[in-house]
Amino acid sequence: MGLFKKKKKTESSGNATVLTVAEIKEETPDSISIGFQVPDAEKSNFVFVAGQYLTLIADIDGVEVRRSYSICGGEQDALLRIGVKRVKDGRMSNYLPNTLKIGDAVNVMYPAGNFRLEDGSKSYVAFAAGSGITPVLSQIKKTANDGGSYRLFYGNNSEESTMFKQELDALSNDHISVGYSYTSKGDSRFTEATVSAILKENSELLKADAFYLCGPQEMIENAKAAITSFGVAPEKIHFELFVAALPEDKKSKKKKAGKSKGAVPATVVLDGESILLSIDPKGDSILDQLLDKGYDAPYSCKGAVCSTCKAKVLEGSARLDANFSLSDKELEEGYILTCQAHPTSDTITVDYDQL
């Protein structure tokens, strides 16, 4: 039996299965890549788009922990690979390199995520920092296979801490290029001024079909501000934050104060079933109230970052405590992050299946 136990709750949800660890490779002193063997019966469920992620589920000290890790492999690779970098006090990011062994069974949710290459596009520019390279590497492999062009600017503390450098160098050619930036000043490696200078010196980059930003929030905000200052349309800029989820104590206390006098009736569509229940608008998030009632709603980070808990409001309305992943278009279409959502209407219908 593997170290990662499959729970009945996950078995019944229909969106996860057990995969076997076939490869573990040290990428840097503080990061690894993990290759999973996908059984033939599950291959159709694990077809992914470059830029997507997997959510791993593990029992750590008696507590179920879920974390999302981006796929770093190509779509045709024999193994399904993810990258994992240690994070200070990170429960899963330290548990995996310390505990995982070849042959272990891991509970893995099906691929998800919207950080994907645009259909019909051929030229891309990306800014990534640290482990933010993981989904970008998958995108580069896809672009190289399709004959497109990809310009990457990649920041790290040092060459030794640069994940996937050998793979990136091997992929580099006339159409795939990587510019490395090394500094020990963390997020300041890509300030707004730095990104602006890069774009000014390489004005042809502004003709790219799409821009991709992946890393800490400050870096993404800096790069986005610089790119839009050159007149690039915001809808051409895609981003994915690589940050730690909100601490559990902050999540649990965030909405405890001020319980409402009455809950509102809610309908939640999940895995083809309509669930009727009551949701307290001033209590915990819609997701947490579903979980407390025993329903296996999808989630991972609970920090407004990964969008695993994304759902669509079909009736009524809701507010979000935070949002680091949904686009303005998705918000306009009625999508919410249920880990951050609270009803603002007298009744609400939320659909997890309309994605």
Image (spheres, rainbow, N blue to C red):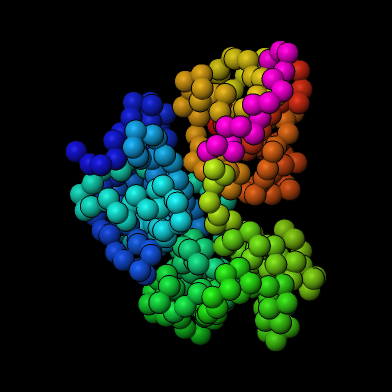
Is residue 259 rendered magenta in the image?
Answer: yes
In magenta, the rendered stretch is 248-264
Left or right, 204 with reference to 164:
right
Question: What residue lies at 34% left-to-right and 37% top-to-bottom?
Answer: 61
Left or right, 165 with reference to 41:
right
Left or right, 299 with reference to 225:
left
- Image x and y of residue 296, in percent: 46, 27
- Image x and y of residue 203, in percent: 71, 83
Above or below for 224 versus 113? below
Question: What residue lies at 25% left-to-right and 42% top-to-bottom?
Answer: 3
- Image x and y of residue 17, in percent: 34, 38
Closer-to-camera residue (48/319): 319
Above or below for 46 versus 214? above
Question: What residue lies at 72% left-to-right and 42% top-to-bottom?
Answer: 331
Question: What residue lies at 59% left-to-right and 15% top-to-bottom?
Answer: 277
Is residue 21 rendered magenta in the image?
Answer: no
Q: Quadrant of residue 71?
A: bottom left
Left or right, 345 with reference to 215:
right
Quadrant, the C terminus: top right
